[in-house]
Structures are given as structure tokens and as C-alpha cells.
């Protein structure tokens, strides 16, 4: 495993940079339930980082801490070398962190194009007054937003359904539209909440390819959580493994695969 913070080049030629986000000794409680117990790990610039673990391990809770949905009772979140104060999700989004949801959260009655456009909201600075006063600027912004969205639609190969209401799409395509919308925000860090849940084998392969391509083409750092160990192993540079709120493994896919605690957790060895 690469412990150094020096940039390095992966076997497939991608450059992984320094630490972008660091979770330090995070503990999150819901009443008496400790969903996350003293967990530390980091996410490096340009990498694909997976958080995996069995049901109830605390993966979603961790993603929600990263995205600002929950503020942990203990521990610190560091982003780009600065300690992050407790923040609301929209403030975290403004820092360049976008996410998708486990249960797709799209506007079913709206077209694919309009759904993806909603991802651009962060970039729409011209309010009503400035639109009236500086029509040129508002128009320029509109053109820029359109261009950015069209590029993503092309990239994710959803041109043919751009006018289709999202509610009519099959599940796998909805997931792709959700990815498009998150990408439209132009994130530096993209959080994917079980991007392959509920997909068939072919859809999973497509989604894996798109995740790799996004990382490659846009240089987006990606953190994803996943239930199924198999699908993320080929995809990820490093993997954090959680079980019962604790971190039981952290390393390259090979290191994690051979970690006895991880093997126990996945084979369902009894816990005290
Ligand atoms: N809002 C909440 N209120 C109370 N308990 C919660 C809440 N969210 C999660 N928990 C509890 O925290 C623990 C971790 O849940 P979490 O959803 O983070 O796990 P997970 O690894 O994402 O599971 P899954 O793979 O099933 O989605 C569980 O015991 C869960 O019941």
C-alpha cells in the first residue's frame, strides 16, 4: 500500500496525487447506536477509493459524514489541508463535493436533459436582477452551462434519451443519469452511493467502465460505497473495509482480499 503522500503512477498509468480529504478518528452515534467507531482514512487526489462492508457496517453513515449530511460527535474532517468546520450539505457541495444516492433521487417527470441541468445550479450565479441588468453575462453563463451538460451527456452515451422523461427509463439508465447530474456540478470529489446496487451483470460492467472513464477523462477523485466486494475490486485503487462501525481493513484490493479480518467478516464468522 502507498503510505507516502508523494504522487505516484498506477500500473494503468494514472497519477495519484496528495491527500485531498482526511477523516481523523470519526465517531458517529445515533442515540445509543455507534454507527462509526473511531475511524480514520484518507482520500487522495485522482484516486478511486472504495468503502465496502456488510449490511449495517456504517458505509452510508460514513458517506453522509463526508457529504456534510451528518456531523460526527467526535473526530475531524480535513479537506485540502484545512480542518472543515461542521457544515451543511450545500456548503460541502460548494467546496466541490457532489454525490449520488442509493435510492435514485431524480425528478421523474422531467427530461434527462433538465435533470442533468439541475446539477449545474452551483454554477448559475446570475440571479434575476443581474439577469435583467447584465443580460450578456447571464446569456454567456447559460451557454457555458449548456455546453458543459451536453459534453457530459455525450460522454455518458445518453444522447438518444436526452428528451425522455426520467420516469420512463429502466433502472440502469436512471443510475447513469444520476451520475451525469452529479458530474454536471463539476465536482473535484464525487461520492457514489452503491452505484451498482440492483443492476444486472451487463449494467454493472457499463457502470464500472463509466466510473473509470470519468476518473480518467475529467480527473475526478471518486469515493464509492458498495456492498458487493467483487465489483469494486477491479475498479478501486484503495479500499477501506468497515464492519460493525469499525475499520477492519485498508489497502490495495489485493491487500484487502488477503486480510484475515476481512475474510472473516465476509464469510460471516461469528462476532462476540
Ligand atoms: N438515521 C439513523 N438513525 C438511527 N440509526 C441509524 C441511522 N442511520 C444508520 N443507523 C444505524 O447505524 C448503523 C450503520 O448503518 P449504515 O446505514 O451506515 O450501514 P451501511 O453499511 O450503509 O448498511 P447497508 O449496506 O445496509 O446500506 C446501523 O446499525 C443502522 O441501523
Image (cartoon, helix red, strand yellow):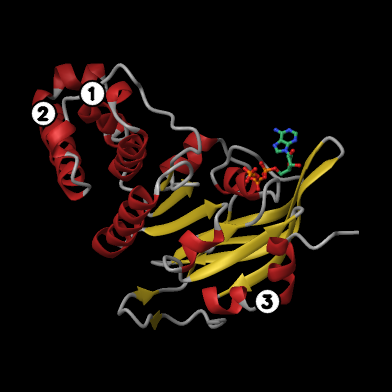
In the picture, the disc for residue 259 is 3
- Mark 3 residue element: loop
Q: Residue at x 84, y 35 (%)?
A: 31
Please identify the quadrant where the C terminus is shown.
Answer: bottom right
Kindly report the distance in space between the C-alpha atoms of the residues bearing marks 2 and 3: 55 Å
- The residue located at (53%, 82%) in the rendering is 2
Q: Is residue 64 left or right of residue 112?
A: right
Residue 8 placement, left or right of 27: left
**Circle 3/circle 1 CB separation < 8 Å:** no
Residue beneath disc 2 = 139
Quarter of the rendered structure image containing ligand 1: top right
Give x and y (percent) for residue 254: 54, 78
In the image shown, does 144 or 132 lie closer to the viewer?
A: 144
Counting from the top left corner in percent of width and height, residue 105 is at 43, 29
Depicted 62 relative to depicted 177: above or below: below
At label 1, counting other C-alpha atoms closer than 10 Å, the crowd grade (few under 14, some 14-19, many 20 or more) is: some
Query: Cβ of disc 2 within 8 Å of ligand 1?
Result: no
**How packed is label 2: few (under 14 Cα within 10 Å), some, or many (20 or more)?**
few
Closer to the camera in the image, 250 or 19: 250
Left or right, 158 with respect to 252, comes to left
Amino acid at each position: 500500500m502507498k503510505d507516502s503522500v508523494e504522487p505516484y503512477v498506477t500500473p494503468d498509468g494514472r497519477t495519484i496525487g496528495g491527500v485531498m480529504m482526511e477523516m481523523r478518528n470519526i465517531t458517529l452515534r445515533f442515540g445509543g447506536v455507534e454507527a462509526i467507531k473511531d475511524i480514520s482514512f484518507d482520500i487522495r487526489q485522482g484516486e478511486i477509493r472504495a468503502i465496502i462492508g456488510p449490511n449495517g457496517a456504517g458505509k452510508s453513515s460514513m458517506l453522509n459524514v463526508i457529504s456534510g449530511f451528518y456531523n460526527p460527535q467526535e473526530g475531524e474532517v480535513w479537506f485540502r489541508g484545512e480542518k472543515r468546520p461542521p457544515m451543511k450539505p450545500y456548503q460541502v457541495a460548494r467546496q466541490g463535493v457532489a454525490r449520488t444516492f442509493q435510492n435514485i433521487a431524480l425528478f421523474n417527470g422531467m427530461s434527462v436533459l433538465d435533470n442533468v441541468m439541475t446539477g449545474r445550479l452551483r454554477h448559475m450565479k446570475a440571479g434575476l436582477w443581474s439577469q435583467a441588468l447584465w443580460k450578456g453575462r447571464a446569456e454567456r453563463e447559460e451557454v457555458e452551462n449548456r455546453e458543459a451538460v451536453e459534453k457530459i451527456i455525450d460522454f455518458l452515451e445518453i444522447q438518444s434519451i436526452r428528451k425522455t422523461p426520467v420516469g420512463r427509463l429502466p433502472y440502469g439508465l436512471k443510475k447513469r443519469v444520476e451520475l451525469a447530474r452529479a458530474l454536471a456540478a463539476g465536482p473535484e470529489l464525487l461520492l457514489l452511493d452503491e452505484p451498482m446496487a440492483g443492476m444486472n451483470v451487463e449494467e454493472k460492467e457499463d457502470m464500472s467502465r463509466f466510473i473509470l472513464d470519468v476518473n480518467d477523462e475529467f480527473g475526478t477523485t471518486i469515493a464509492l460505497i458498495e456492498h458487493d466486494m467483487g465489483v469494486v475490486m477491479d475498479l478501486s485503487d484503495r479500499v477501506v473495509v468497515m464492519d460493525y462501525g469499525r475499520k477492519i481493513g485498508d489497502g490495495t484490493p489485493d491487500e484487502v482480499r488477503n486480510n484475515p479480518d476481512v475474510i472473516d467478516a465476509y464469510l460471516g464468522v461469528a462476532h462476540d
